[in-house]
């Protein structure tokens, strides 16, 4: 049986992952509006990955006999005023998610909940990758986003991203 505080945090994380999906979908929609289909594709895939994360937290809770409570998902609240903005917000957001997952890990550790710690290992590694990827994309957009020819090429590069299912299977 899992610790009550850990269960609450895992439940909250489901909501945060769905919010992340919603946020990235908002970014994708912004780029659709700007006719940058490659950027839109990149964030649509990002949104799909976040939904996968949410489903993994749900599955983990269910595998441990916990009933999952779904809460309301907040509307994306980032004010996008420039092509570079989603990349900035995404890096900031991934750092927030990393802190959230580290906090669950710390609570699981305090509760000697080794099973949850092991489950979260995958997410801790994943968050490291998410931050690196977000940082790389931000640097690219900062460097090439201002010039239309470079932006065209970057858009093509991002159009090539394909969805991959998470390597964690529960
Ligand atoms: Mg995530």
Image (cartoon, rainbow, N blue to C red):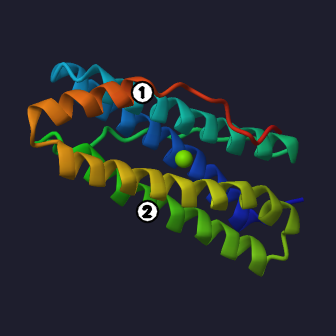
Identity of the residue furthest to the right in this view: 1
- State left or right for residue 153 relative to residue 113: left
Residue at screen point 52% across, 63% down = 98
Q: Which mark is residue 36?
A: none
Q: Nearer the viewer, residue 120 or 6?
A: 120
The quadrant of the image that shows the C terminus is top right
Residue at the disc numbered 1: 44
The 10 Å Cα crowd at callout 1, few under 14, some 14 to 19, many 20 or more, is many
Q: Is mark 1 within 8 Å of ligand 1?
A: no
Q: Do residues under tags 2 and 1 come within 8 Å of each other at their CB atoms?
A: no
User: Mark 2 or mark 1, which is nearer to you?
Assistant: 1
- Please provide percent x and percent y for residue 22: 40, 34
Q: Is residue 112 visible?
A: yes
Q: Nearer the viewer, residue 144 or 164?
A: 144
Marks 2/1: CA–CA distance: 20 Å
Residue at the disc numbered 2: 96
Residue at screen point 43% across, 38% down = 73
- State left or right for residue 78 relative to residue 123: left
- Please provide percent x and percent y for residue 104: 65, 66
Count all numbered tags in the image, as a single digit: 2
Q: Is residue 83 above or below residue 157?
A: below
Residue at screen point 77% across, 46% down = 61
Picture quadrant where residue 92 is located: bottom left
Does label 2 or label 1 sit earlier along the sequence?
Answer: 1
The 10 Å Cα crowd at callout 2, few under 14, some 14 to 19, many 20 or more, is few
- Please provide percent x and percent y for residue 47: 46, 33
Q: Nearer the viewer, residue 120 or 34?
A: 34
Q: Is residue 78 visible?
A: no
As helix, strand or loop, the secondary structure at mark 1 comes to helix
């Amino acid at each position: 049986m899992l610790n009550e505080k850990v269960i609450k945090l895992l439940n909250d994380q489901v909501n945060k992952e769905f919010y992340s999906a919603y946020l990235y979908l908002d970014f994708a929609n912004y780029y659709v509006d700007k006719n940058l289909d490659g950027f839109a594709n990149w964030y649509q895939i990002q949104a799909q990955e976040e939904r996968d994360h949410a489903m993994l937290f749900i599955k983990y809770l269910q595998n441990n006999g916990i009933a999952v409570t779904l809460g309301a998902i907040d509307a994306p609240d980032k004010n996008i005023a420039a092509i570079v903005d989603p990349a900035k917000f995404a890096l900031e957001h991934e750092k927030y998610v990393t802190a959230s997952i580290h906090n669950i890990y710390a609570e699981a550790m305090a509760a000697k909940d080794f099973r949850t710690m092991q489950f979260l290992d995958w997410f801790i590694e994943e968050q490291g990758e998410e931050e690196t990827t977000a940082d790389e994309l931000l640097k690219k957009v900062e460097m090439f986003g201002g010039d239309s020819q470079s932006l065209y090429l970057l858009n093509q590069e991002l159009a090539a991203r394909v969805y991959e299912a998470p390597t964690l299977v529960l």
